[in-house]
């Protein structure tokens, strides 16, 4: 019997070590995603400057309140009296992916802005904080771009979708009308599900490492009950468009439906059979029609702030 008890203790210790080690590896990946720089863009065949996307633009550096900065571009749009649209990428992506998407938005905008989120690309910030400072960064980008009174449209994909929603919510709560529309692609309502989805894609179990990693993010980076993206959608005072694939295994579509339904002027365009990302490639006509419709609706919603 003592030998059996000793063996069980060893197994328990081994399990704790495995869980702790796995959680730390997961946390490191979440906070330090692989930085997608120009080499990745070249490998993907993406444009590495606006001219390669058939657009004109200038490279800029955006500066934030914690003395960090990130590179980006301010691209000239095709509609001189249109709004400025700011594109925020997702986790483990970067500004080059958004530069590749800029031609989709340029026909409706006076400017299209792309940038690296903190902890991504060539941002000088060492870590991705999953909301700890990213919304402040996005609002700082707006402050550093002249909109000439035409207002801003915020687009975000996946992780960036949440930041676009929260930024729009904050602006509405303080009575600002400079956010004229919010567009989210692959948005999720709560943070646990996409972490589990990423683990499952890699053949790893979601429980309990995803839950332990989330606890760290909650206590150390302020993720908590106010994270609910549907809550923030309900505070918007502008139109909201959600673009989502019905087969999304990272951000199941039920969350996006709740987010769209929560907004006073929200709607969802679903892409049958599409997974997380690449919606514009999978159904370019549906994507283009959805963008055209939302830009025509700007200013038509005056929800209570």
Image (cartoon, grey):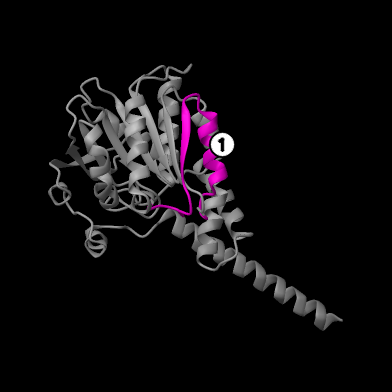
> Residue at 23% across / 27% down in the picture?
82
Is residue 47 rendered magenta in the image? no
> Residue at 35% across / 31% down in the picture?
293
* Picture coordinates of residue 137, whole percent (x, y): 34, 37
Q: Quadrant of the N terminus?
A: bottom right
* Picture coordinates of residue 185, whole percent (x, y): 42, 43
Q: Residues within 10 Å of mark 1 (few under 14, many from 20)?
A: some
> Residue at 37% across / 53% down in the picture?
282
Q: Is residue 269 above or below residue 204?
A: above
Of residues 55 and 246, which is closer to you in this image?
Answer: 246
- Residue tagged 1: 258
Of residues 60 and 149, which is closer to you in this image?
Answer: 149
**Visible in this render: residue 36?**
yes
Q: Is residue 298 above or below residue 66?
A: above
For the image, the number of numbered tags is 1
Q: Which residues are magenta?
A: 249-278
**With 303 as the anchor, is 22 left or right in this view?**
right
| SS at mark 1 in the image | helix
Of residues 2 and 233, which is closer to you in this image?
Answer: 233
> Residue at 49% across / 30% down in the picture?
233
Is residue 276 rendered magenta in the image? yes
Q: Residue furthest right?
A: 1
**Visible in this render: residue 137?**
no
């Amino acid at each position: 019997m003592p030998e059996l008890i000793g063996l069980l203790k060893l197994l328990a210790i081994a399990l704790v070590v495995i869980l702790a080690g796995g959680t730390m590896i997961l946390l490191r990946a979440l906070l330090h995603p692989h930085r997608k720089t120009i080499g990745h863009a070249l490998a993907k065949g993406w444009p590495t400057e606006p001219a390669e996307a058939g657009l004109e633009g200038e490279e800029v550096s955006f500066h934030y309140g914690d003395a960090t900065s990130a590179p980006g571009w301010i691209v000239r749009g095709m509609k001189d009296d249109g709004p400025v649209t700011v594109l925020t990428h997702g986790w483990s992506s970067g500004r080059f992916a958004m530069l590749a998407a800029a031609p989709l938005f340029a026909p409706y905008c006076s400017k299209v802005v792309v940038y690296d989120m903190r902890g991504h690309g060539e941002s000088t910030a060492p870590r991705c904080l999953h909301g700890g400072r990213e919304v402040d960064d996005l609002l700082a980008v707006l402050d550093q771009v002249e909109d000439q009174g035409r207002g801003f449209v915020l687009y975000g994909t996946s992780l960036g979708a949440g930041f676009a929603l929260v930024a729009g919510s904050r602006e509405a709560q303080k009575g600002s009308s400079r956010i004229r529309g919010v567009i989210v692609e692959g948005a999720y309502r709560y943070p646990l599900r996409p972490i589990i989805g990423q683990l499952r894609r890699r053949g790893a179990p979601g429980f309990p490492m995803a839950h332990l990693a989330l606890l760290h993010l909650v206590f150390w980076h302020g993720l908590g009950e106010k994270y609910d993206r549907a809550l923030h959608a309900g505070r918007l005072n502008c139109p909201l468009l959600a673009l989502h694939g019905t087969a999304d295994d990272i951000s199941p579509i039920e969350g996006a439906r709740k987010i769209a339904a929560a907004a006073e002027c929200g709607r969802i365009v679903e892409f049958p059979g599409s997974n997380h990302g690449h919606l514009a490639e999978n159904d370019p006509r549906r994507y283009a029609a959805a963008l055209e419709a939302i830009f025509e609706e700007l200013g038509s919603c005056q929800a209570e702030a």
